[in-house]
Amino acid sequence: MRILVIGSGGREHSVVRKLKESVKAEKLYCAPGNAGIAADAECVNISAMDIAGIVNFSKDNAIDLVFVTPDDPLVAGMVDALEAAGIKTFGPNKAAAIIEGSKAFSKALMKKYGIPTAAYDTFTDAASAMQYIKKQNKYPVVIKADGLALGKGVIIAENEAEAEGAVKSMINDGIFGASGKTIVVEEFLEGTEVSVLAFTDSVTIKPMASSKDHKRAQDGDMGANTGGMGTISPNPRYTPEVAKVCMEKIFLPTIAAMREEGRAFKGCLYFGLILTDDGPKVIEYNARFGDPEAQVVLPLLKTDFIDIILAIYENRLSEIDIEWENAACACVIMASGGYPAAYEKGKEIFGLNGNGQLDYENVTVYHAGTKSEENKFLTNGGRVLGVTAKAETLEAALEKAYSAVSQIRFDGVAYRTDIGKINKAGA
Ligand code: AMP
Ligand code: GLY
């Protein structure tokens, strides 16, 4: 098959690498890709949001399958446009991608179908939001922009003044754009976070190996929320008992709810969960693979990735067995100093071989924000590299990942030194 992967981050690099392992992958393209992906696929200079450009490229190049990886093109309807042109896709259509595109939608869905989540209300004016927050008088309180915000649209306010600042910046100042002017105010949940990505054809759902993302910028879960600073898989707190409860109370009810709403979801559905004393609750849905969750989950997949994708496309996911390696992965993100706020780009990256990798067994350097110039790799984004190691145990994977990280250098590099460790709340 001739396959086109949409996007340019570490997640897309891990998708490309997994697809490449399949004997069915005859030719791989990535739009727009990055300097590391270029070693594994032919990068084409089309933006991930250029729907017409992607459709035209796919037709002109006899593409058999387009893997739409990032949230923005999914929410904007890239899958619908490709399917209208007769091209096979992986990813939900626009009607289904709203489960990530609008938090007001996903919260209302959970309420309607009794899926466990944090108590909440939705607001479009700052005064009513503040009235609700003052009445609850419970801190921290979580304030979320309705629409997509690069993983930064969530503010955990510790007191009334912080809450007021967050509400006003979203509703009055529109810091997350028009769709962020609708906000969700929700109860803060205590507990361990787990990410579960699941393959689904809208009727059958098959969870992948569980994972844990470390979203805060600094060690000890301090600093701002980021897109994710490191991941481990599997998540040691996600026991078979917890998995069973999640399947019954969250996963199956969610895909049934989406079918019921006429929004059948096909692709990878991401459940962001918190394991509370009251049982697992949903804090967010994503309509796609997580980044950097994909970088630790996909390396553990043993079954042919393309076979799974085709089974989803043809609504026969129930017919295939999906196997996972009995091993662990750890991914450490090497970021540009300053991320998720302002940072510099264009720093030379030292330590990588010509393919942008390290010569370490079971270590993969997934490129997130890199470009190449005159045979050099340069930083080109907030998250620069995701260094992933696989080993028999989580401890061994972490040790190997950090050992690999120590081989790579660039000016202003920032990374967390406590990926895979217990956080301050004991979670
Ligand atoms: P989200 O983009 O919704 O995943 O939120 C980003 C991060 O904020 C999550 O990974 C959690 O760490 C945190 N968060 C979001 N909602 C809640 C909540 N209701 N209670 C506690 N933490 C939350
Ligand atoms: N790592 C979290 C996300 O992809 O949304």
Image (tube, rainbow, N blue to C red):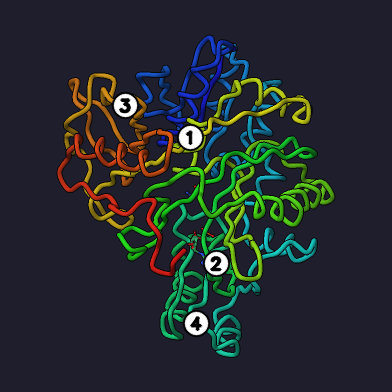
CA distance separating discs 4 and 3: 44 Å
User: For the residue marked with disc 2, what is the amino acid?
Assistant: Lys
User: Disc 2 vs disc 1: which is toward the camera?
Assistant: 1
Are the residues flagged by discs 4 and 1 in contact, CB closer than 8 Å?
A: no
User: For the residue marked with disc 1, what is the amino acid?
Assistant: Ala
User: For the residue marked with disc 3, what is the amino acid?
Assistant: Ala
User: Disc 4 vs disc 2: which is toward the camera?
Assistant: 4
Query: Residue 181 — which label?
Result: 2
- SS class of the residue under badge 3? loop
Residue annotated with mark 3: 35
* Direction from residue 413 to residue 161 in the image, left or right: right
Query: Residue 327 — which label?
Result: 1
Residue annotated with mark 4: 139
* Direction from residue 171 to residue 341 in the image, left or right: left
- SS class of the residue under badge 4? loop
Looking at the picture, does residue 160 appear above or below residue 65?
below
Mark 4 and ligand 1: say if the CB distance to the nearest ligand atom is below 8 Å.
no
List x then y, in percent, for residue 321.
Answer: 70, 27
